[in-house]
Amino acid sequence: MQTHLRGKDMITTQEWTKDEIDTVLDLALDLKRSRAVGRDHAYLRDKVLAMLFFFTSTRTRASFEAGIAQLGGHGAFIDSTTTQISHGDT
């Protein structure tokens, strides 16, 4: 069975099927193993991913930035306390 993940958001897994979760975990393991043997991936080449955190989390931010960079992308951190979001704008 082929699982299609294009367009899926990973904010919560509550709306995901077991097959979709298994597919993501299998892909993550494949990427980790490939990187361990020196094979880089550029899945995010020329992409900028914005990261918006409502609570300070240095480890989470660093992990996301490292993962994005390892996949060839650039992570842009947006601080919710210094944006219009802190004033209730969406």
Image: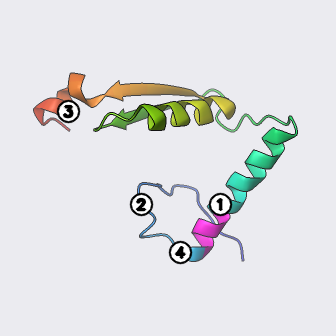
Q: For mark 2, what is the residue?
A: 12
Please name the residue shown 52% across and 55% down the image.
Answer: 7
**Residue lying at 68% horizontally and 53% vertically, measured from the top left:** 28
Among the two numbered marks 4 and 3 on one chain, the one whose residue lies closer to the N terminus: 4
Q: What residue sits 67% from the left and 35% below the top?
A: 71
Q: Locate residue 56: give its quadrant.
A: top left
Taking 47 as reference, is 13 above or below it?
A: below
Residue range corresponding to the magenta coloring: 19-23
User: Mark 4 = which residue?
Assistant: 17
The chief SS type of the magenta part is helix
Amino acid at circle 1: Leu
Residue type, numbered disc 4:
Thr
Q: Are marks 4 and 3 in contact (CB under 8 Å)?
A: no
Image position, residue 11 (x, y; %): 41, 54
Say whether residue 83 is visible.
no
State the mark number for residue 85. Answer: 3
Disc marking residue 40: none
Look at the picture and state if 71 lies above or below 13. Answer: above
Residue 70: image x %, image y %? 68, 32
The answer to whether 34 appears left or right of 54 in the picture is right
* Residue marked by disc 1: 25
Disc 4 vs disc 2: Cβ atoms closer than 8 Å? no
Q: Earlier in the sequence, mark 1 or mark 4?
A: 4
**Structural distance between the alpha carbons of marks 1 and 4:** 13 Å
